[in-house]
Amino acid sequence: MIRFSDIAGNPVMDTASALTVGRVGSLVVDPAARRVVALGVRKSKGPGDTLPWDGIAAIGPDAVTVDSEQRIADAPGELRRQASLGEKLIGHRVLDDHGRELGHVRDVEFDPRDGSVVTLILKDAYVDGARLLGLGSYAVVVRALAPSDSMPDTVPDRA
Amino acid sequence: MSVLLRAAELVQRPVVTLDGEDVAQVKDVVYASATGELAGFTLNGRGLFSGPMRKSLPWAAIHGLGPDAVMIKDESVLATRDALGDGGGASVLGSWVMTDGGRRLGHVTDVILAVGPGVTDAVRYEIEPADELAPRRQFVPLPDTLAVSSEALLVPEAATEFIRDDLAGFGAAVDEFRERLRAGAPPGSTVTGAPLEEPAASGTAGEEAR
């Protein structure tokens, strides 16, 4: 599993030219698929500033690699909307579907193989990525736990 | 576990879709004139300068009612303003609470809701008592159904035994009160022609349909 904080700011390296073509700026998440569908790239030398998931060659500990800077392009349609929301993801408000605020997103843990969102990390709660319902301009909406208890959704031991 | 909530607290709370967009905020609470239940909310737009919206939020369309937001599935559940019924001042706020024994208890200042996972129920009225010596704020439990008109709102005489000054421990009192009403005729309600029975029948049907 990778956390966004592990790769934020890391260089995006073009494996053809061995040049840094940008830096990882944000995560673009599709709430319906519960997956990371792209990375937002800062200081991009490509034609745009969104790197779609299937354009990524590898996500390593020190850099994200691409086979061409052309992979970093302008996001089409729906992806563009998600990309603009992605910039707000870290720090965004989290509401459950019973209308209770759980906190704010501190970090996002995802699977580097397929991009599936594993955990949303809040100040004092871990929210399972499977509970993700929506991501909008006001809040991230997650499914409430079945018994609507007043305790935060903590996971006791997590390595 | 359910949470107690004043209806008036809901005013200005954001209305958020499950997609995470805040589409409105609660402007005012509307009560159904027939039953005194919540009919829904009128809405304001979000933001500092936005005015009232043409849309309203019917009670049945609410997905979740929490301390931080009113959740709805999406914008399509919003209805036109007229959908909330006559809407012409059908408010229970300010109405007199009268027992079927013919005693005025006070007038309604707010409605307290019990909000649990998936269920919301108006459980009591906050009243300003008619009795000058009583504490300035009292809570009257609501029976499952009751008769309401623009003039007054009728509760069984037995409700007076369950009036409390504060909300603590009130949940059990409401349950006990309703239990007793279901079990049999409340003692002391000897007034003939009490309009409780008939509206009760239709009111219950409407409530269960929700």
Image: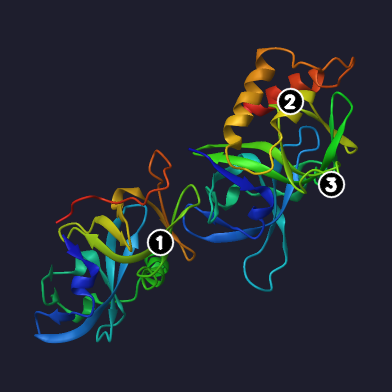
Badge 3: chain ID: B
Q: Residue B190 is drawn in which quadrant? A: top right
Q: Residue at left 23%, top 65%? A: A53
Please state which amino acid type lies under the numbered disc 2: Gly
Distance in Å between CA atoms under marks 1 and 2: 40 Å
Distance in Å between CA atoms under marks 2 and 3: 22 Å
Q: Bin the neighbour count of mark 1 within 10 Å (Cα to Cα): few under 14, some 14-19, many 20 and up.
A: some
Q: Residue at left 19%, top 73%? A: A7
Indicate which label's residue lies in the foreground, 2 or 3. 3
* Quadrant for the C terminus of chain B in the image: top right
Reading the image, the residue beneath label 2 is: B203
Please state which amino acid type lies under the numbered disc 3: Gly
Return the x and y of residue B121 as percentages of the image width and height.
62, 36
Q: Of helix, strand and loop, which one carries label 2?
A: helix
Indicate which label's residue lies in the foreground, 1 or 2. 1
Residue sitting at the far top? B184
Badge 2: chain ID: B
Which mark is on residue B210?
none
Instruction: Identify which residue, B91 or B102, lies in the foreground.
Output: B102
Q: Of helix, strand and loop, which one carries label 1?
A: strand
Distance in Å between CA atoms under marks 1 and 3: 38 Å
Q: Residue B171 is drawn in which quadrant? A: top right
Residue B61 located left or right of residue A45: right
Return the x and y of residue A87 as percentages of the image width and height.
37, 73
- The reply to whether label 2 and label 3 mark residues of one chain is yes
Task: From this view, report whether residue B32 is shown above or below residue A97.
Answer: above
Reading the image, the residue beneath label 3 is: B94
- The reply to whether label 1 and label 3 mark residues of one chain is no
Which mark is on residue A103?
1
Q: Bin the neighbour count of mark 3 within 10 Å (Cα to Cα): few under 14, some 14-19, many 20 and up.
A: some
Task: From this view, report whether residue B23 is shown above or below residue B171.
Answer: below
Q: Of helix, strand and loop, which one carries label 3?
A: loop
